Image: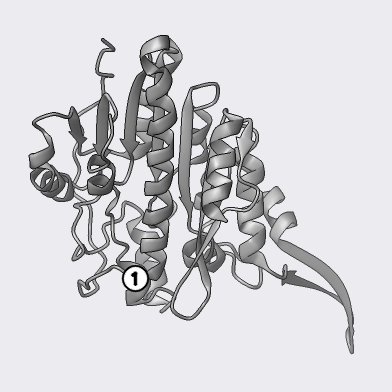
Amino acid sequence: MVREYEMSEEASQCMMANEPVSSWGGAWTEEKLNAFEKYVNAYLTIMNKYRDQYGWKLIYFDGFAGSGSRNEAIVSDDNQLMIDLIDEHQLTAEELTPYKGAAERVLSIAQDGFDYYYFIDKDVVSSQMLEEKLAPFKANKKLIFRASDANNQVAELAKAMHADNKMKSLVLLDPFGMQVNWATIEQLKGTGTDLWILIPTGVIVNRLLDRRCKLTHIDKLVSFFGKDEAYLKDYFYKTRQESTLFGETEIVEKVKEPIRLIADLYIEQLKKIFKHVTERPLVLYNTRNTPIFHFAFASNNPTAVKIAKDIIK
C-alpha cells in the first residue's frame, strides 16, 4: 500500500475581495466541469483495467477545491493583484465567483475510484466546509483535506511520485487567478501525471498586459509563464516608427489577438514538461462572448491526450 505522501499543515487566512457574494453556476463553469467529469470517467475506465496488473496506486489531486458551494465568495492569495483589478473596474461580479464543483462529481462516479483523494485549498474555512460537505463519501473512500498553498502541495506530490513510479495522479488545477507558479508545473516533469489546468487568459493575464507595455505586475507574469521580462515584452508587444513634427518616434503597441497568444505561449511551455498537450484547449466564454479561460490538458500518455481532445471537440 502506498504511503500517504507527507504534506505540511500550514493554514493561512486570506483576505476576501470586497465584493458581494453571488450565486454561481453559469455556462462556462458547467462546460468546464462537464468536460472534466467525462475525462475522469474515461481515465478510471482505462486505469481500472491495469491497476492490479501493474500495482498502480491512483491519486486524485484538486489544488483549488474551494468549499463546494455555489455561494462562495472569491478568496485569493493574490490579494493586491485582485484589489487592483477590482479598483480599475476590470473584474465583474460574474467573473469574481467561479463555482468549484469538481469534488462531488468525481466522488460520485459509479466505478472503482482513486486510492487517495486530495482536496487542497489555502483558505481554512473553505477547506473545512468542503470536508463537511463530502463527509458522506468518507465511509468507503480515502479523502484527505489540506488547508495549504497548492504550489507547495504539488511539489510534495511530485516528490512522492518521483520516488515511487507506481503512483499515478490525475491533477486538477483551476485557480481563479495566477496562483500557480511555472516552477510548480516543472515539478511534475517525468511523473505519471495527467494534468487539467485552467489558464486565466482573458479574465486576468490579458488585463495585466496593458496597451503601452507598462507591465506593473511583471513579477507575477514572469512567475506565471516561466519567461523573463524581455521575452514577454518581445512576445506581447511590437514596436514601430512613426513620423511626427518632431521627427521619428517609437510607438509600442500590444499584439493583436493577445488572449489567443497567451494560451499559445502557455501551451508551448507545457510541451517542455509533458510529451503530449492539447494544442487547442477548451475555450470558456463569459456572457459577453469574450474568452476568459482556456482549459488545457497535458500528459505523457498519447492515449490520454487523444481522449481529452475528443472531449474538447
Judge from the rendering whether residue 218 lies leftward or rightward of residue 91; answer left or right.
Answer: right
Q: Quadrant of residue 109?
A: top left
Front residue of 199 and 109: 109
Query: Could you say where residue 62 lies in the image, as x and y percent from the top left?
Result: 32, 40
On screen, residue 285 above or below 146: below
Write the residue at 60% across / 48% down: 266
Query: Could you say where residue 27 lies in the image, as x and y percent from the top left?
Result: 39, 70
Judge from the rendering whether residue 4 lies leftward or rightward of residue 30; answer left or right.
Answer: left
On screen, residue 138 above or below 98: above
SS for tag 1? loop
Q: Quadrant of residue 57?
A: top left
Residue type, mark 1 in image: Gly
Residue count near mark 1 (Cα–Cα under 10 Å), binned few <14, some 14–19, many ≥20: few
List the residue tagged with mark 1: 26
Judge from the rendering whether residue 302 lies leftward or rightward of residue 163; answer left or right.
Answer: right
Query: Could you say where residue 49 lies in the image, as x and y percent from the top left?
Result: 41, 22
On screen, residue 95 above or below 267: below
Answer whether residue 203 is visible to the viewer in this image: yes
Write the residue at 18% across / 59% down: 69
| Quarter of the image with the C terminus in it | bottom right
Colour scheme of this structure image?
one colour
In the image as oriented, which residue stretches furthest toward the bottom?
245
On screen, residue 179 above or below 305: below
Front residue of 207 and 109: 109
Query: Could you say where residue 245 lies in the image, as x and y percent from the top left?
Result: 89, 89
Answer whether residue 159 is visible to the viewer in this image: no
Write the residue at 32% across / 76% down: 93
Write the residue at 27% across / 48% down: 105
| Quarter of the image with the N terminus in it | top left
Front residue of 301 and 277: 301
Front residue of 279 and 37: 37
Judge from the rendering whether residue 224 lies leftward or rightward of residue 146; answer left or right.
Answer: right
